[in-house]
Image (tube, grey):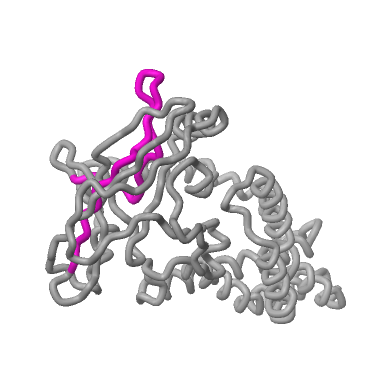
Amino acid sequence: MSFSYYSLPFCKPKEGVKDGAENLGELLMGDRIENSPYRFKMYTNETEIFLCQSNKLSADDFKLLKERNDEMYQVNLILDNLPAIRHTKKEGFMLRWTEYPAGVNIQDAYYVFNHLKLKVLVHKYEETNVARMRGTGDAEVMPGEPIVFTYEVAFEEIDIKWSSRWDAYLKMDGSKVHWRDLTRYEELDKEAQAQMTEVLSGWKLVVGAVFRAPSNPALLCIMVGDGVQILGMAVVTILFAAVGFMSPASRGTLITGMLFFYLILGITAGYVSVRLWRTIGCGDHRGWASVAWKAACFFPGIAFLILTTLNFLLRGSHNTGAIPFSLFVILLLLWFCISVPLT
């Protein structure tokens, strides 16, 4: 579960904690963007910048830090809409993470990373930057003792253009194709298919039941219609993402697009459900309206019930993944005003 960074006894901005503007997709994913206390000037390298000194840790604060360290919670930083990268080189490979640990546990002693070294890469002509961070200091946390937070920042000019600044996040180092393994898997697959051919020869024993009407044709039609709607949503979303309409720079766009396409493709769920009902409805064509209505409410109703239950649990644990009540109202309006009429 995700929690606010400021739920821990860390430094807060002088102007107070403020939530960033977020779209529908970010809210559904549970992303909560808050301002940070780190401040620096462009092209000005600084070292050993004093950030703040926390209050003396109470027993509750120390217990919370221990729990978060034991559960290996990570901190995410964003600069210029890019996640800060923590990197290291191991066995010839460059390992990258888009977060850093809130703290560590070493031999029953708990430490927090109270000093960050930020390296900002800046294009020569465009002020496009990405931060690389490295923790250079740690402080053991003790009950009744404060924590001093510091940081430093350095700027470096590079030739990475704005259009290529996401390459460092999307590139996968060390990915190789092992043709020998693929060939072996293909041989195993042929052997499995040969064995399945013998087993499937018994389908003739149940050939008479293939064309028999199902015991619950309405449920079959509803599930097929909803399945076509979900499949269509996935295909259209992948196509739009492939042509670049859903850039990773636009946070939450993917989830927002999936929700939009699902609502619009409700018309396919209604058509397929009713069409299949008229085909296998045993001659009863009067129930098509009921089938269409159930197709519009079956899957979204189950999803909404699960979402409501999980949201109550998350809100009870003060988790940042809990969605606000206003978003519930928006989802209900989208469901009954767009999806249901189209279906």
User: Which residue lies at the image location 38% right of the left edge and 46% below the top edge?
Assistant: 52
**With respect to residue 26, does 269 lie above or below?**
below
User: Which residue lies at the image location 44% right of the left edge and 56% below the top edge?
Assistant: 13
x and y percentages locating residue 273 in the rendered image: 71, 72
- Residue placed most toward the observer, 284 or 34: 34
Verify whether residue 119 appears in magenta: yes
> Which is the main secondary structure of the residues drawn in magenta?
strand
x and y percentages locating residue 292 in the rendered image: 76, 74
**With respect to residue 331, does 6 lie above or below?**
above
Residue 82 visible, this orientation: yes
x and y percentages locating residue 151 in the rendered image: 28, 47
Left or right? Give the position of 84 relative to 195: left
- Residue placed most toward the observer, 120 or 233: 120
Q: Which segment did they paint magenta?
A: 94-122
Left or right? Give the position of 3 relative to 10: right
**With respect to residue 24, does 51 lie above or below?**
above
Query: In terms of image quadrants, where is residue 102?
Result: top left
x and y percentages locating residue 304 in the rendered image: 70, 59
- Residue placed most toward the observer, 79 or 209: 79
| Quadrant the C terminus occupies | bottom right
**With respect to residue 80, does 341 lie above or below?**
below
Left or right? Give the position of 335 relative to 134: right
User: Which residue lies at the image location 69% right of the left edge and 53% below the top edge?
Assistant: 306
Query: In terms of image quadrants, where is residue 244?
Result: bottom left
Left or right? Give the position of 233 relative to 100: right
- Find the residue positioned furthest to the top: 107
Residue 96 visible, this orientation: no
